[in-house]
Amino acid sequence: MPVSNAPGLTSLDAEAMQRAVEDTVDGTLRSFVEFTADDFALLYVDDVTLSFYDDESHMLDHFEEIHSYVHIDFTETDFFTDRLFPLASDVRYHATSLDAFTLVRVYFDDEGLFVTLDRDEPIEPVVGAVEDVYAG
């Protein structure tokens, strides 16, 4: 059975953003997490993702390990806008495509969403759906 939790860690309308992503993807939403530099809240994990772990506690330990590196995302974002591409004022998202799935981190100042999608899922429509909710 999928894991599902109520949002509340960030100021984002994560519930509406999750619905928007679910309505946008052609494949399967694998996980949906809200995060800050200091913490994360696991909002949704599908059955397939959960099956990779011994149990939910094991999965949460792994997500905690993943989150322990999120400060790199915020540092890297500043590096891109301050040093490498000063013409740009903002980093909208980072995407990492692995052979098994695609990870997308969408940023809104000092908070964001971590979304896991099927490997071949188009990213821009998903990010656009999240940003539309944010702008709305």
Image (cartoon, rainbow, N blue to C red):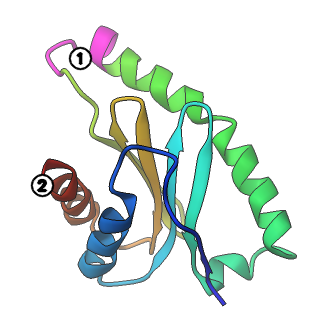
Q: Residue furthest bottom?
A: 1
Q: Which quadrant: the N terminus?
A: bottom right
Percent from the top left, x then y, of residue 127? 26, 56
Percent from the top left, x then y, of residue 93? 33, 43
- Give the alpha-carbon distance from disc 1 to disc 2, as whole Å: 28 Å
Task: Point out the stretch of residues depicted in magenta.
Answer: 81-88
Does residue 87 belong to the magenta stretch?
A: yes
Q: Secondary structure at mark 1?
A: loop
Could you tell me the amino acid type at mark 1? Phe
Q: Secondary structure at mark 2?
A: loop
Instruction: Examine the rendering and report whether any part of residue 96 can be seen.
Output: no
Q: Which residue is mark 2?
A: 136
Q: In the displayed structure, would residue 30 be above or below residue 68?
A: below
- The numbered disc on residue 28 is none
Instruction: Examine the rendering and report whether any part of residue 59 can be seen.
Output: yes
> Reading the chain from its start, which is encountered first: label 1 or label 2?
1
- The numbered disc on residue 85 is 1
In the picture provided, is 73 more to the left or to the right than 108?
A: right
